[in-house]
Amino acid sequence: MRHIYLVGIGTGNPEHLTVQAINTLNKADVIFIPSKGVAKAELADVRKDICQRYVTNKAIRFVDYAVPVRQTADRSYVQSVDDWHAEISSTYERLFQEHISEDGSAAFLVWGDPSLYDSTIRIIERVKARDRVALGYSVVPGITSIQALTASHRIPLNLVGKPVQITTGRRLAESFPGMVETAVVMLDGEQAFSKIDDPDAYIYWGAYLGTEDEITIAGRLADVSDRIMATRAEARARHGWIMDIYLLRKGSDFDDQA
């Protein structure tokens, strides 16, 4: 039976890799490297740099592949993602059939951690469900963008005794600031923080975390919102892509004590 390793690689710093991740990569027969076009060539380059640094098994083969583009026209968000995952699962199935022997193994280098707003696990499960390729898989955790963000800003993730919500830009207004004191926001192409009107809210924002291009901005939301949007737009234009995340917070430790 073929075996697939999903290896979390952190947010761009090759030193984020764990010993477990390095050992797992060296066990694979094949390592798949996704190509997302010229604009995102840097993401493939980071993966290749990691392999050059840590993969010492000379027998391993490297296979580049094109990632299908998500189509959004005339589709709901959920439908567009569902269709996209179906296309990617077909691509994976083909890769497994063409490049892995029936008792062989392969690895994917997954940005951040495979459990956090990444769909590689879901897509592998789709391949398994179609039952055209017999396979098993293992997941190796990685440093998350949340960990990288809080480390760069030198802040704890939570306030003492209080919950944290992890959400997307599309859903932010449903919970912050009314329901939770701390919200971590991922996948926000519309800068939902700019629509939060609360003089007591603070933001801790970061882009390209863990890389040489890392940018961080923090402060009272009303004071730095425009600066973040301008910085984000300039960085995206310069690189052709952006990965960013932010934490919104209202309140402080022990502020609910009598």
Image (cartoon, helix red, strand yellow):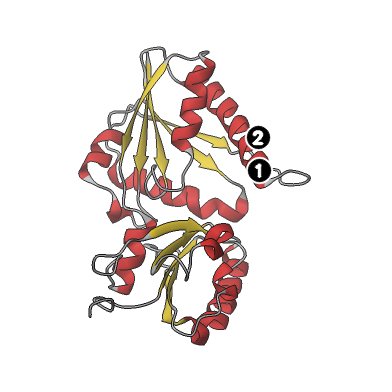
Task: Specify whether 58 is left or right of 233.
Answer: left
Disc 1 marks which amino acid? Arg
Q: Secondary structure at mark 2?
A: helix
Outermost residue on the right side: it is 74
Task: Specify whether 174 is left or right of 138.
Answer: right
Task: Specify whether 54 is left or right of 171.
Answer: left
The answer to which quarter of the image holds residue 20 is: top left
The image shows residue 171 at horizontal and vertical percentages of 55, 58
Query: 190 or 210, which is in the foreground?
Result: 190
The image shows residue 258 at horizontal and vertical percentages of 22, 80
Which callout, 1 or 2, points at the residue further toward the start of the chain? 1
Query: 160 or 185, which is in the foreground?
Result: 160
Residue 256 appears in the figure: yes
Query: 37 or 248, which is in the foreground?
Result: 248
Query: 164 or 224, which is in the foreground?
Result: 164
Residue 69 appears in the figure: no
Disc 2 marks which amino acid? Asp
The disc label shown at residue 83, or none: 2
In the depicted structure, whether residue 111 falls above or below residue 206: above
Between the residue at mark 1 and the residue at mark 2, the CA separation in whole angstroms equals: 8 Å
How many C-alpha atoms fall within 10 Å of the one at disc 2: few (<14), some, or many (≥20)? Answer: some
Q: Secondary structure at mark 1?
A: loop
The answer to which quarter of the image holds residue 208 is: bottom left
Taking the spot 57% from the left edge, 64% from the top edge, the residue there is: 239
In the depicted structure, whether residue 240 falls above or below residue 143: below
